[in-house]
Amino acid sequence: MANQPAFKVRLGLITATVWDNEGFYSVDLSRSYRDKEGNWQNTTTFSHADLLNIAKCAERAEIWISRKTNAS
């Protein structure tokens, strides 16, 4: 069974996924899109229109991580 993310936040097509690596948190940012066949894919390449949602997702991930690390 694959590891599950500790936290995930999505705004529009942008997703921030937080991983807990034994108390060290890392964050993946990705954008969902449909390919020519209509299948959902993810990319780590972003357009200008994505930047505000990237910033908001990153901020929410940072707040979640801060709460987790300050609670211990």
Image (cartoon, rainbow, N blue to C red):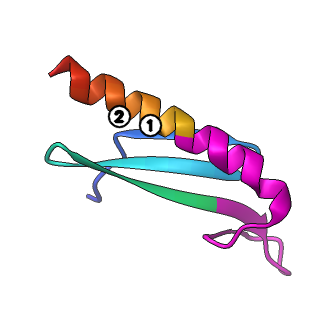
Residue 30 in which image quadrant:
bottom right
Where does the image place residue 69, in percent across and percent down from the top left? 23, 29
Where does the image place residue 3, in percent across and percent down from the top left? 28, 54
Q: Amino acid at mark 2?
A: Ile
Where does the image place residue 36, in percent across and percent down from the top left? 85, 81
Residue 10 in which image quadrant:
top right
For disc 2, the marked residue is 65
Is residue 30 toward the left or the right of residue 48 in the image?
left
Q: Residue at x 41, y 29 (%)?
A: 64
Q: In the image, which residues are magenta?
A: 31-58
Point out the image quarter for the N terminus.
bottom left
Relative to the observer, which residue lies in front, 59 or 12? Answer: 59
Mark 1 neighbour density, 10 Å: few (under 14) some (14–19) many (20 or more): some
Residue 43 lies in magenta, yes or no? Answer: yes
Mark 1–mark 2 distance (CA, rounded to whole Å) = 5 Å
Residue 62, which numbered label?
1
Relative to the observer, which residue lies in front, 65 or 17? Answer: 65
User: In the rendered structure, are the residues bearing label 1 and label 2 in contact, judged by CB atoms less than 8 Å apart?
Assistant: yes
Q: Amino acid at mark 1?
A: Glu
Q: Secondary structure at mark 2?
A: helix
Residue 38, which numbered label?
none
Residue 50 lies in magenta, yes or no? Answer: yes
Q: Secondary structure at mark 1?
A: helix
